[in-house]
Image (cartoon, grey):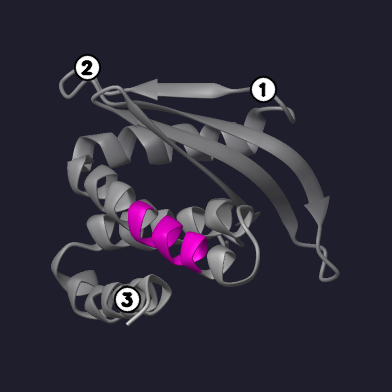
Amino acid sequence: MTIARIAIAAVVAVSLGACQSMQDNPKQTGGTLIGAGLGALAGSQMGSGKGQLAAVAIGALGGAWLGSEAGKSLDKADRMYAERTAQNALETSRAGQTSTWRNPDSGHEGTVTPIRTYQTASNQNCREYETTVTIDGRQERAVGRACRQADGTWKIVQ
């Protein structure tokens, strides 16, 4: 069995396992899935042909593991700081302006930076953003999109 096939089988196993663990620990599962996606994206930028497929699979596995560790490490207070900062940044910060949060008890910290503001075809206000989370000196970065809801809050849609 080739390395690429083993790596693909492992990616499928991680994905299937994520379905069950979503109920048990949603933050760890979310971190796993985001990490796998970012790792696969990074892997897709390397190699060509069969080598590129292996790089994607290996990147997905490595990203899944790192994302899982980051998600497992964020506690309820960390999430509260991050969510509050995200809501404030998306509501009041101009594009490119970074807002930061830090939990003094855990030492975990992060940033939220709106990148672009736009309206959808249905006139819904949305913003693209970049976020980072630093846990024990390791930083994870992600980009996403959030749209304003009818109640005035921002909801992550991607």
What residue would you read off at disc 3? 6
Q: Is residue 10 magenta?
A: no
Q: How many marks?
A: 3
The amino acid type, in three-letter code, at marker 3 is Ile
For the residues carrying marks 1 and 3, which lies nearer the camera in this image? 3
Q: Specify whether 93 is left or right of 70.
A: right
- The answer to if 59 sits in the magenta stretch is yes
Q: Residue 69 location in percent, x, y?
A: 23, 46
Provide the major secondary structure of the magenta segment: helix
Residue shown at the point (22%, 17%) measured from the top left = 104
Q: For residue 116, what is the image quadrant?
A: top right
Between disc 3 and disc 2, the foreground one is 3
Image vertical order of residue 47 relative to residue 101, above or below:
below
Q: Residues within 10 Å of mark 2 (few under 14, many from 20)?
A: few
Q: Which residues are magenta?
A: 54-62
Residue in the picture at 40% in, 60% down: 58
Q: Position of residue 16 (x, y in %)?
A: 28, 82
The answer to whether residue 75 is seen in the rendering is no
The answer to whether one can see residue 52 in this image is yes
Residue under pointer 2: 104
Q: Is residue 143 above or below residue 123?
A: above
Find disc 1 in the rendering and name its residue: 97
x and y percentages locating residue 65 in the rendered image: 28, 53
